[in-house]
């Protein structure tokens, strides 16, 4: 039992992983991947589409969850990853809002 406690403590210290919450952390990552794939599938079907973070949640995602600051921050993180990976392109317009669309090489 002492070895198990020691090993769990080492996981927390070295990797920042809490074994009690590890399953939750994995499922969040899987949920984020599902959302990213849903965004890309939407753009595959609607290649001319461009939308804000709130619009992506409201119109592109099939779950149509109510917009909350937490949900928008999750979508922001996913969209930023897709921009970094070269899948989406951000377009800042005059009113300061940013719209995202499928990346098209020039």
Image: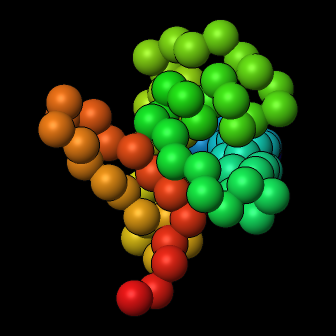
Q: Image point 45% across, 51% down: which residue? A: 100
Q: Residue furthest bottom?
A: 106
Residue 1 is at least partly visible in this image: yes
Q: Image point 46% across, 86% down: which residue? A: 105
Quadrant housing the C terminus = bottom left
- The total of numbered circles placed on residues is 0
Is 66 in front, or is 59?
59
**Residue 12 horizontal side relative to residue 34, left or right:** left
In the image, residue 57 above or below residue 19: above
In the image, residue 70 above or below residue 88: above
Q: Position of residue 104 (x, y in %)?
A: 50, 78
Q: Position of residue 82 (x, y in %)?
A: 52, 63
Q: Position of residue 30 (x, y in %)?
A: 77, 51
Is 1 in front, or is 65?
65
Q: Image point 65% across, 24% down: which residue? A: 58
Q: Position of residue 10 (x, y in %)?
A: 53, 58
Quarter of the image for residue 41 reads bottom right
Quarter of the image for residue 102 reads bottom right
Q: Image point 70% across, 38% down: which residue? A: 60
Quadrant housing the N terminus = top right
Residue 77 is at least partly visible in this image: no
**Residue 93 horizontal side relative to residue 31, left or right:** left
Is 29 in front, or is 51?
51
């Amino acid at each position: 039992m002492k070895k198990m406690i020691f090993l769990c403590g080492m996981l927390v210290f070295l990797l920042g992983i809490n074994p009690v919450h590890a399953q939750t952390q994995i499922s969040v990552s899987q949920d984020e991947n599902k959302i990213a794939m849903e965004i890309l599938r939407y753009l595959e079907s609607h290649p001319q589409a461009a939308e804000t973070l709130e619009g992506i949640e409201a119109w592109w995602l099939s779950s149509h969850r109510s917009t909350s600051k937490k949900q928008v921050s999750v979508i922001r993180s996913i969209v930023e990853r897709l921009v970094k990976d070269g899948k989406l392109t951000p377009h800042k317009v005059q009113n300061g809002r940013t719209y995202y669309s499928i990346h098209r090489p020039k």
